[in-house]
Image (cartoon, grey):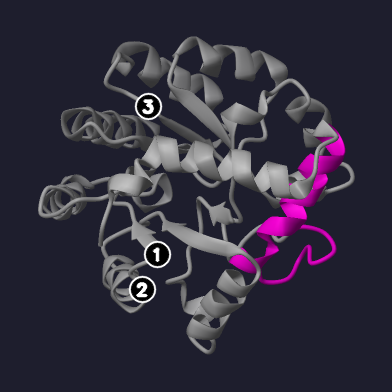
Amino acid sequence: MYIDSHTHLYSNQFDEDRSEIILNAINSGVEKLLLPNIDIESIEGMYALEKEFPKNCFAMMGLHPCSVTENYTELIAKIKTELFSRKFIAVGEIGIDLYWDKTLLSQQKEAFAQQIEWAKELKIPIVIHARDSFDEIFEVLDKQNDENLSGVFHCFTGTKKEIDKIRSYGNFIFGIGGVLTFKKSGLDKVVEDLNLHEIILETDSPYLAPSPHRGKRNESAYIPIIAEKLSDIFEISSQQIGEITSQNAVNLFNLNNFKN
């Protein structure tokens, strides 16, 4: 069994064939699909997937940093209402993104810190989006980290130095996706510094499709491609990669005790 720990299957890019895409994933051995929220508009579609595939789809709740506006307080208040209205596997996708826009850094940091507090209160993990922002992410975590905080750095593409910093927090692991298969990414050399028990697999569908599908729409059925690349790096079977990384995801998100 594989788990796709980060997939946006509610995206409008799947409007024509969403159920088929999910069944393709399940038939490929990807039996659990973890859904990070983006904004207010994504919630309804995410809930619909949980309802249609209750044994396969599991929702998170959070406000994506690229959805943080100058006056974000009303948005995040709605996110809080949803978050505390029912159970979720995680608070996510949250974090800081300075690739597209640096002008809202203070608002992104405030929204990130607030959502971390909620996760600690609920004792569920966070799913961190970090793009061109490791230093800023670490600045927030240095203040917020304690024994109640755990999570994953989604789509990790950092350095060995950043691995060491993340390890210092104690309860974080690394989400590895299609970038690992890109020839010039260099991520394969960085991943060698990780322990398999620190890794979960993800696609970030519909984005970042692995080679040989790079540039096309990504989908959860491609998780075994990422596992195959990891099997080459760690010199064990892709089945073992699936077993270990899936157990890591089950442990982090407490999936065995979660029911939709």
Q: In the image, which residues are magenta?
A: 210-233
Image spot of residue 219 (x, y percent): 62, 68
Left or right: 121, with 156 as reference point: left
Q: Amino acid at mark 1?
A: Cys
Left or right: 79, with 136 as reference point: left
**Distance of label 1 from label 3 (alpha carbons):** 21 Å
Q: Is residue 11 visible?
A: yes
Q: Quadrant of residue 189?
A: top right
Chain-order first, disc 2 or disc 1? 2
Q: Which residue is tagged 2?
A: 49
Whether residue 225 is in magenta: the answer is: yes
- Label 3: state its secondary structure: loop
Image spot of residue 235 (x, y percent): 85, 35
Q: Nearer the viewer, residue 101 or 240?
A: 240
Image spot of residue 84 (x, y percent): 12, 47
Position above or below: 145 against 101:
above
- Label 2: state its secondary structure: helix
Marks 2 & 1, CB-CB < 8 Å contact: yes
User: At x 81% / y 37%, what residue is drawn?
Assistant: 236
Whether residue 223 is in magenta: the answer is: yes
User: At x 28% / y 69%, what residue is drawn?
Assistant: 47
Position above or below: 28 against 144:
below
Q: Residues within 10 Å of mark 1 (few under 14, many from 20)?
A: many
Q: Amino acid at mark 3?
A: Ser
Image spot of residue 210 (x, y percent): 75, 57
Q: Which residue is tagged 3?
A: 150
**Distance of label 2 from label 3 (alpha carbons):** 26 Å
Q: Is residue 103 visible?
A: no
Q: Which residue is tagged 1?
A: 57
